[in-house]
Amino acid sequence: MEKRKIKIQGRVQGVGFRHFTVQNARRLNLNGWVMNMPDGSVEALITGDDEDVSKMMDKLKEGPAAARVDRLEWDSAEPDSLPDTFRVKR
């Protein structure tokens, strides 16, 4: 099981990035959350099988059509509690 905390920078707010992330994460049976950050970036916590997490990282690098991903940073994460679904966090 892989756990990653990801920060996505670029034109990623107001372009459907969170919805895109939720849809793709659910298709890949991943758990976690995605949220807009005050600095204009998007942050996500993704947990699941290594292969599926890698596929999700590829999706996040692309983003939805209206987005422009300039930078994607991630670290392994040990969250306090693991979500049992994937959702938008507010």
Image (cartoon, rainbow, N blue to C red):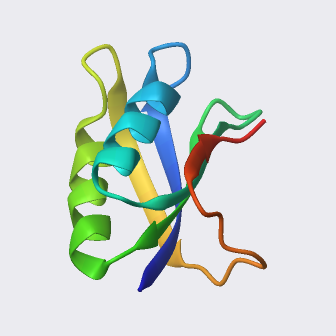
Query: x and y percent of residue 5 in the render?
Result: 56, 66
57 vs 1: above or below: above
70 relative position to 7: left or right: left
Residue displayed at 23% across by 38% down: 62
Q: Residue furthest front?
A: 84
Query: x and y percent of residue 4 in the render?
Result: 49, 72
Q: Nearer the viewer, residue 89 or 60?
A: 89
56 relative position to 90: left or right: left
Residue displayed at 40% across by 73% down: 48
**Res 11 seen here:** no
Residue displayed at 78% across by 79% down: 80
Q: How many marks?
A: 0
Q: Can you tell which quarter of the image residue 55 is in? A: bottom left
Q: Nearer the viewer, residue 25 or 68?
A: 25
Q: Quadrant of the C terminus?
A: top right
35 relative position to 1: left or right: right
Q: Quadrant of the N terminus?
A: bottom left
Residue displayed at 38% across by 49% down: 25
3 relative position to 67: left or right: right
20 vs 35: above or below: above
**Res 52 seen here:** yes
51 vs 90: above or below: below
55 vs 79: above or below: above
Query: x and y percent of residue 40 in the render?
Result: 64, 29
